[in-house]
Image: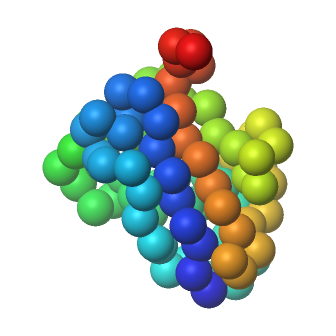
Amino acid sequence: MKVHVRYFASLREALGPSEEVELPEGSTLGALRDRLIARGGRHAEVLARGRAVRCALAQVMSDESAVVADGAEVAFFPPVTGG
């Protein structure tokens, strides 16, 4: 399945505004984050475990156990962003 990933604030500066990611059916937000970290480079640096990163699924704040559906929009951002 394919999901649309958007980045905000400092994550956007490091990774760009968005990208499409292929995931196996039934994947969670945590599995998506791990897949992005596994790419290495800037993804591994800014999304690393131990770094505070918030996520939203379909514009609703969610924890990493939330299951992602095909075509979903996922957002990653630091815990505090400017307005």
Seen in the picture, residue 30 relative to 55 is either above or below; the reply is: below
Give the image location of residue 32, x and y in percent: 55, 61
Nearest to the observer: residue 5 or residue 31 = 5
Where's residue 9, x and y in %? 43, 28
Q: Please state which of residues 83 and 44 is positioned toward the viewer in this rendering.
A: 83
Please state, as top left, top right, bottom left or bottom right, where the N terminus lies in the image: bottom right
Residue at image location 36% in from the left, 27% down from the top: 10
Q: Position of residue 82 (x, y in %)?
A: 52, 13
Extreme front residue here?
83
Can you see residue 60?
A: yes
Q: Judge whether residue 62 can be spotted in this image.
A: no
Tell me if residue 82 comes above or below residue 63 in the rendering. Answer: above
- Residue at 58 percent across and 60 percent down: it is 31
**Residue 15 left/right relative to 22:** left
Q: Residue at point 57% right, 81% down?
A: 2
For residue 25, side relative to residue 23 (left or right): right
Q: Describe residue 63's horizontal placement relative to residue 15 as left or right.
A: right
